[in-house]
Image (cartoon, helix red, strand yellow):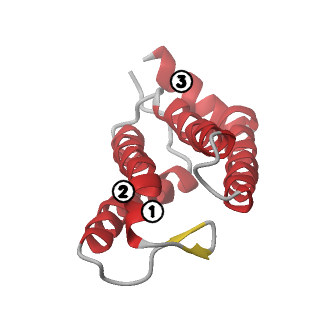
Amino acid sequence: MVNPTQPFAIRVLTWFAGLASAAMFLSILLAFLDIGPTMMGGERVTRTEWLHVAAPLVAVIGILMALISYGFASRRAWSRHLVMTMFSLIIVYASTLGALNLIHHAIMWRAIINGAAFGCASAWYFYFKPNVAAYFCELKKR
């Protein structure tokens, strides 16, 4: 069966996701070693707060980014679903922590707005942009 032509942006996103995954784990290591500032939602937080609140999400996002990179590189149809899962997870995590008053509401709203904005842009690109949607439909048929 003929391999469909991979859109250029998917090739770029493959590398971006792989590098972002490595950066996620590096940020956890640096926070653990108390190197550099710890920030959530653009606000400085204590190292302990960052490790308890942000590090679990950063670790899961790092794993998802690695899987997304692998999925794009190996031309797997499920990879676009992981992108949407990642942004949904950010929204759910921020909403839950905000509802439990474990994070400042400004940080919560920033995460929700960013997750929704990037999630909507990703949904358009992966599901509604004609050439990209056709590419993933061809992958699904294989």
| Residue 76, position as x, y percentages in the image | 41, 30
Q: Is residue 34 left or right of residue 68?
A: left
Q: Is residue 120 left or right of residue 2?
A: right
Q: Residue at coordinates 53% horizontally, 24% vertically from top-left?
A: 138
The amino acid sitting under disc 2 is: Ser
What is the spatial separation of the Cα atoms under label 3 and label 2, in whole angstroms?
27 Å
Tell us which disc is closer to us: 3 or 1.
1
| Residue 65, position as x, y percentages in the image | 41, 48
Figure quadrant of the N terminus? top left
Asked whether 11 or 106 is in front, the reply is 106
Tell us which disc is closer to us: 1 or 2.
1
Whether residues under marks 3 and 1 lie with C-beta atoms below 8 angstroms apart, the answer is no
What is the spatial separation of the Cα atoms under label 1 and label 2, in whole angstroms?
22 Å
- Per the image, the residue denoted by label 1 is 49
Q: Residue at coordinates 29% horizontally, 78% vertically from top-left?
A: 34
- Per the image, the residue denoted by label 3 is 138
Asked whether 91 or 69 is in front, the reply is 91
Q: Earlier in the sequence, mark 3 or mark 2?
A: 2
